[in-house]
Image (spheres, rainbow, N blue to C red):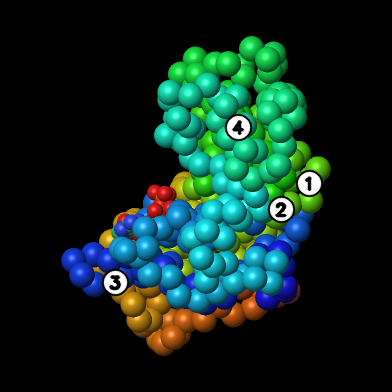
Amino acid sequence: MDKGLLNIKNLSTSFRINDQFYAAVDNVSLSVNKNEILGIVGESGSGKSALAFSIMGLHDKLNSKIEGEINFKDQNIAALSEKKMNKLRGEEIGMIFQDPLTALNPLKIVGEQISEMLYLHTRLGKKERKDKVLDLINQVGIPRPEYVYNQYPHELSGGMRQRIVIAIAIACDPEFLIADEPTTALDVTIQAQILSLIKRLKNETNSGVILITHDLGVVAEMADRVAVMYAGQIVEIAPVKELFKNPKHPYTRSLLNSVPHGHEAKSKLHVIQGMVPSLQKLPRTGCRFAPRIPWISESAHEEHPELNEISPGHFVRCTCYKHFEFPDQVEEAVGNGVTGS
Ligand SMILES: Nc1ncnc2c1ncn2[C@@H]1O[C@H](COP(=O)(O)OP(=O)(O)OP(=O)(O)O)[C@@H](O)[C@H]1O
């Protein structure tokens, strides 16, 4: 894989459960370049947030364990002290959290919350900080910055609150942004505004972005490349157009097929049943997706599934995709007098 602004190598993040550690992120390698948005998709429990929190160094050290490397601008930030990580967080890597209500302090006016970031990470004086905060509120598309500066989070709409969270994340011009489900809590029109804001900021600052979402429409709109996570592993990674045009892994195909398209209202949705197993129940050997596609023979899977590059920049884990059909598609084909391959 190419060398980017962020290079993650063999990252595993494990959590302590009943005195044993279980990996929620399991041997993940990926890179993100400047001015690139990497979308990360996957069902709930696939390890997306655990990965994001690992990059930000936000896991509780007592109950989690991180192995592997998280190289940011050629420095392994997984090995940094808490003090250095505190400096890096916000200053060089900003994070936009899913729920603005929990990300913001309900007892402080929003202007001060943005200003605090500048106080911690810059040498700006009080007046310069205020000017910069007003400028940031303006940049994230909120009218009347002077007025909004003095408001409490509960006085703002959900969309405005998320803009404030974004203003905090970009206050120090970070070179990298992690957005973890940034629009999940918002209604559709506001979603579109927030996403175009993130894209504009990325273009203006040339920053690298990881965008975590379970919404494939968002990924199609925003990402340059997409990584599909299942049970702690990347099962497929490809440039966005390639992934949508030529999805290979059964899990990716199932995710894509579960999105209804308006113009195909009457066509059937082929979906794989089941869900990501809990950490303790996760199969740790062989193809982790095999239990959800039991109609695919054991010999179709690799014993130790790796990410194989099948075309430039398009990687797929395991060989089972070569033999995969949705069972109801096979039935349809047989019903039509055509045998499924
Ligand atoms: N602090 C923790 N302690 C124990 N297990 C955890 C912890 N955080 C996450 N997990 C487990 O790790 C797995 C991955 O969780 P994670 O939150 O990363 O998934 P996700 O893909 O981000 O899901 P969602 O879309 O719901 O946010 C899950 O099985 C989850 O229960």
Q: Could you tell me if residue 76 is visible in this image?
A: yes
Element under label 2?
A: loop
Q: Position of residue 216 (x, y in %)?
A: 56, 47
> In this figure, which residue is indicated by the disc labeled 1?
205
* Relative horizontal placement of residue 341, taking residue 126 as reference (left or right): left
Mark 1 and mark 2: Cα distance apart in space: 7 Å
> In this figure, which residue is indicated by the disc labeled 4?
114
Q: Amino acid at mark 1?
A: Thr
Q: Amino acid at mark 3?
A: Phe
> In this figure, which residue is indicated by the disc labeled 2?
175
Mark 2 and mark 3: Cα distance apart in space: 33 Å
Element under label 4?
A: helix
> Mark 2 and mark 1 in contact (Cβ < 8 Å)?
yes
> In this figure, which residue is indicated by the disc labeled 3?
21
Mark 3 and mark 4: Cα distance apart in space: 37 Å
> Mark 4 and mark 1 in contact (Cβ < 8 Å)?
no
